[in-house]
Image (cartoon, rainbow, N blue to C red):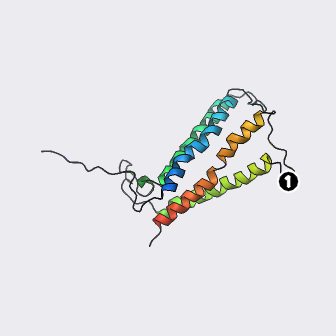
Amino acid sequence: MTTHTAHINTTATARPVPRWAVGAAHAMPLVALPVCLWRLPIAFGYGMGGEVLPPSPWNIPYVVGLSVLSEAFALLSLGLVRRWGEVVPTWVPKLGGRRIPPFAVILPATISGLLFTALMVHWAFGALQLGGADGFPYAEGWDVLAMTVSGLFTLWGPLLLALTFAYYRRRRPR
């Protein structure tokens, strides 16, 4: 007696995903990576041209955890272009194989995208010193590096909103 298991394509979605959306979803972790790496020396007491964090046993777990969490959420955006963003993977107990309601994905992704887009506006005011903003609190030279890595990170909001819109268009009833 032989058992035959069907191969489930984890990337195939119910409707085709636009090529630009796949590229944007793959770019999300790369957009977050520079600021995640930037934070790490700060956790270990190096100010990166700015103020050094006051000594605390929580600095390392907090900053490392924040970086790991940022990358995890960036990788989660791949669900907007993959099958596991439409159907719960079969290995998940009790829920495996169930269809994910589009609203359960679209609502948190839209809220997150709007919040990160607001962060982008806040960043622009600081970086360009608009409206009386002081700019970046880093030493000369370091401010350019800080502005670059954090500027990349601010692309997260618009990218997430674009991905969410593509997801909505694919998942909406015809």
Amino acid marked by disc 1: Gly
Residue at the extreme bottom of the image, as rendered: 174
Q: Position of residue 42 (x, y in %)?
A: 70, 31
Label 1 crowd (10 A; few <14 / some 14-19 / many >=20): few
Mark count: 1
Q: Position of residue 5 (x, y in %)?
A: 24, 48
**Residue at point 41% right, 54% down?**
83
Q: Position of residue 80 (x, y in %)?
A: 49, 55
Query: 109 or 120, which lies in front?
Result: 120
Left or right, 162 with respect to 57, comes to: left
Question: Relative to 53, does residue 14 appear above or below in the rendering?
Answer: below
Q: Position of residue 90 (x, y in %)?
A: 35, 51
Which of the image's four quarters has the N terminus? top left
**Residue at point 65% right, 58% down?**
114
Q: Is residue 114 visible?
A: yes
Question: Relative to 102, does residue 53 appear above or below in the rendering?
Answer: above
Which of the image's four quarters has the C terminus? bottom left
Residue at the extreme right of the image, as rendered: 132
Left or right, 60 with respect to 49, comes to: left
Q: Is residue 80 visible?
A: no
Q: Secondary structure at mark 1?
A: loop
Residue at the extreme left of the image, as rendered: 1
Left or right, 83 with respect to 75, comes to: left
Q: Which quadrant would residue 158 be assigned to in this image?
A: bottom right
**Residue at point 59% right, 59% down?**
110
**Residue at point 18% right, 46% down?**
3
Left or right, 20 with respect to 47, comes to: left
Q: Which residue is mark 1?
A: 131
Q: Which quadrant would residue 121 be assigned to in this image?
A: bottom right
